[in-house]
Image: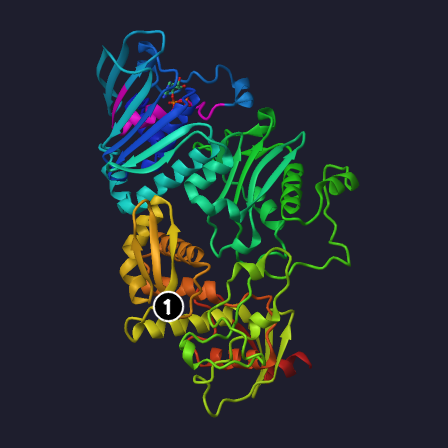
């Protein structure tokens, strides 16, 4: 008995749609890419209900003839390649000819399109792969495509969609990727009637600022390199702005946003000693590679690519980043390493590594009010900063740590138990603290331990009621992208209980007029970004506790960097504080804070 049958197109398309369109953001991507491939110079994106009910893209590109308007919804219908060889000369975003077929299989689609040399355009409606209507119509040159009720015929998919705020942030991220790479095209983006982005055609730097905030460029260094295997242009983040979560990291190859572990690692390695462990720089890098040396057809959404000259490209990118950071010159590297496997030898012996860029008092106790602070610093007349010292002036590139900054705040005394055991401590590599216990030795990871201490303090302070805010002398304006603004609005009550006074003043801008007493006002924007990105991460994984998530971000941001050498009494305090924590043996993000070697283990090893 024969049991095989060929699936009808509508079913095959639905199956293909599973790969290409898994959520509203991927439909947005396909439609925007089509508009760019059509040569549009101005593109509007209009979304309702985070893309559930409407995704519309209007472009002023080349438009389609009436027969193409019908054909474009067929599977494997594309104007972009003709033969398999063309796959290796691709300069367009699309080429697989399956996006519109997939979208039309799982939504109600209406397309209006007109070419510049025809008087009338075409309107065509299609629903679940079935054409409902096609007729001539009058419409502007270009294409407008509306995708309504995505997944209307696949309830399972629909039910998998996340909260609107999450779907919207995926769409926004997709929009940002496309708008960044195509800075010469004007884009606008409306959600539920609200204008989220209005981007004029501009250069790359201007586009970055338009998306991430006016002052964002000040956080970046320019990077540029013209070589045969790859041309590099873009910006990499200054090391002092590195964050605990991967935030603004964008790599584009031939105009296409890609995820590529090797390329990211090449950039991040260039930061080597410059940023604390587990922090990540921002980068916006455009790579131009000969399409014949690139395979973009290894993944349906084309965010993964393969390079033929992989190792050379990595090496050049890494060297170019180092050069931008002022590390060493690419010219030298390439001259001395003419082979393709560029080997970066260790830094010369007399090279003095840059000091970590962030200096602040590691043992500052958030419970201390300013008034109760006394100073150990001999120069009592000097005005001292009792808040965490994030002052940018003291961290400009290449400066070393200012001793004064570290000593201005005394060690907290009120939390120290009277019968506090005194630990003899040693610092190892400025990163670990070795202390002797009654029964052995403990090796403590300085930064993680500090994070744990701060986290528990912040949390217990929060649990004992709303934290009283401290007014800022000069309120600070912070600006975010639209999704982050919505998220920040959601988090405002928690932030208020935590001691922040933040109010929206429109245009995705907020004014911060008060903060908890131990937060410096000079890096507020970064702190809030960190809180939002941690919260987003927690939210996507599990329903995180908001207060905990905020305390965690604050503790991370406030904790001492692992490279800061502490004084003996500061180390002893840190050890004492760590042992009085409720969960001393792991950092708030779950990493081990200490290793204990008891006398038994030691004698075992000496056997
Ligand atoms: P692909 O982009 O891979 O070719 P799609 O399914 O996305 O496949 O689109 C099919 C074809 O429809 C494209 O090759 C193009 O010729 C045409 N098309 C789609 N969108 C537009 C648009 N906005 N303007 C002009 N032509 C378009
Ligand atoms: Mg396409």
Q: Say if residue 181 shows up in the picture.
A: yes
Mark 1 neighbour density, 10 Å: few (under 14) some (14–19) many (20 or more): many
- Name the residue at 27% across, 9% down: 120
State the image coordinates of residue 220 (x, y, percent, origin top left).
Answer: 54, 46
Tell me: 416 left or right of 130: right
Residues in magenta?
92-111
Residue 388 on the magenta segment: no
Q: Say if residue 545 shows up in the picture.
A: no
The front one of 222 and 263 is 222
Name the quadrant of the C terminus: bottom right
Q: Quadrant of residue 408?
A: bottom right
State the image coordinates of residue 508 (x, y, percent, origin top left).
Answer: 33, 46
Q: Is residue 484 above or below residue 123?
A: below
State the image coordinates of residue 132 (x, y, percent, origin top left).
Answer: 20, 18
State the image coordinates of residue 199 (x, y, percent, origin top left).
Answer: 39, 33
Q: Secondary structure at mark 1?
A: loop
The front one of 300 and 456 is 456
- Name the residue at 24% across, 21% down: 126
The front one of 595 and 483 is 483
The residue labelled by disc 1 is 516
Q: Is residue 562 above or below residue 572?
A: above
């Amino acid at each position: 008995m024969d049991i095989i049958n060929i699936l009808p197109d509508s079913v095959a398309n639905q199956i293909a749609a599973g790969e290409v369109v898994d959520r509203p953001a991927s439909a947005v991507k396909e439609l925007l890419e089509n508009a760019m491939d059509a040569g549009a110079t101005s593109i509007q994106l209009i979304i309702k209900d985070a893309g559930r009910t409407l995704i519309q893209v209007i472009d002023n590109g080349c438009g389609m003839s009436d027969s193409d308007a019908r054909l474009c919804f067929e599977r494997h219908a594309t104007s972009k390649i003709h033969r398999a060889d063309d796959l290796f000369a691709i300069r367009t975003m699309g080429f697989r000819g399956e996006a519109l077929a997939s979208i039309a299989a799982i939504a109600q689609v209406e397309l209006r399109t007109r070419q510049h040399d025809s008087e009338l355009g075409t309107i065509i409606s299609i629903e679940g792969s079935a054409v409902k209507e096609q007729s001539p119509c009058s419409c502007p040159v270009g294409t407008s495509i509306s995708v309504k009720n995505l997944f209307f015929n696949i309830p399972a998919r629909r039910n998998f969609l996340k909260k609107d705020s999450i779907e919207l942030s995926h769409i926004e991220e997709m929009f940002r990727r496309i708008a960044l790479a195509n800075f010469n095209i004007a884009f606008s983006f409306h959600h539920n009637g609200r204008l989220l982005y209005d981007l004029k055609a501009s250069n790359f730097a201007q586009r970055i600022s338009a998306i991430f905030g006016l002052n964002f460029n000040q956080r970046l260094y320019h990077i540029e390199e013209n070589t045969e295997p790859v041309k590099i242009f873009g910006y990499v983040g200054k090391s002092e702005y590195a964050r605990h979560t991967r935030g603004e990291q964008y790599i584009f190859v031939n105009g296409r946003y890609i995820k590529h572990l090797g390329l990211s690692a090449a950039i991040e390695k260039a930061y080597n000693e410059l940023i604390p462990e587990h922090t990540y720089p921002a980068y916006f890098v455009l790579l131009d590679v000969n399409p014949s040396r690139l395979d973009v057809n290894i993944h349906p959404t084309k965010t993964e690519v393969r390079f033929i000259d992989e190792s050379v490209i990595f090496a050049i990118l890494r060297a170019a980043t180092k050069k931008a950071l002022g590390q060493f010159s690419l010219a030298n590297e390439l001259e001395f390493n003419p082979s393709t496997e560029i080997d970066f030898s260790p830094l010369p012996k007399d090279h003095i590594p840059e000091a970590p860029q962030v200096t602040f008092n590691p043992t500052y106790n958030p419970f201390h009010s300013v008034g109760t602070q006394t100073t150990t610093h001999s120069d009592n007349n000097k005005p001292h900063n009792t808040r965490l010292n994030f002052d940018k002036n003291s961290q400009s590139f290449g400066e070393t740590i200012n001793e004064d900054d570290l000593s201005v705040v005394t060690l907290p005394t009120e939390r120290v138990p009277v019968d506090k055991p005194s630990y003899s401590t040693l610092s190892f590599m400025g990163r670990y603290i070795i202390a002797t216990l009654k029964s052995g030795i403990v090796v403590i990871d300085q930064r993680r331990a500090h994070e744990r201490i701060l986290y528990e303090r912040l949390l217990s302070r929060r649990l004992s009621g709303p934290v009283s805010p401290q007014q800022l002398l000069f309120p600070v304006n912070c600006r975010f992208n639209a999704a982050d603004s919505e998220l920040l609005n959601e988090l405002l009550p928690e932030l208020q209980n935590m001691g922040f006074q933040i109010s929206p003043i429109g245009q995705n801008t907020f004014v911060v007029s008060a903060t908890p007493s131990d937060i410096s006002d000079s890096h507020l924007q970064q702190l809030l970004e960190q809180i939002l990105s941690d919260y987003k991460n927690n939210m996507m994984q599990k329903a995180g506790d908001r207060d905990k998530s905020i305390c965690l971000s604050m503790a991370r941001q406030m904790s001492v960097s692992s490279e800061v050498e502490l004084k003996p009494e500061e180390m002893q305090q840190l050890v004492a504080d760590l042992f009085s924590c409720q969960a001393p043996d792991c950092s708030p993000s779950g990493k081990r804070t200490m290793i204990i070697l008891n006398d038994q283990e030691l004698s075992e090893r000496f056997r």
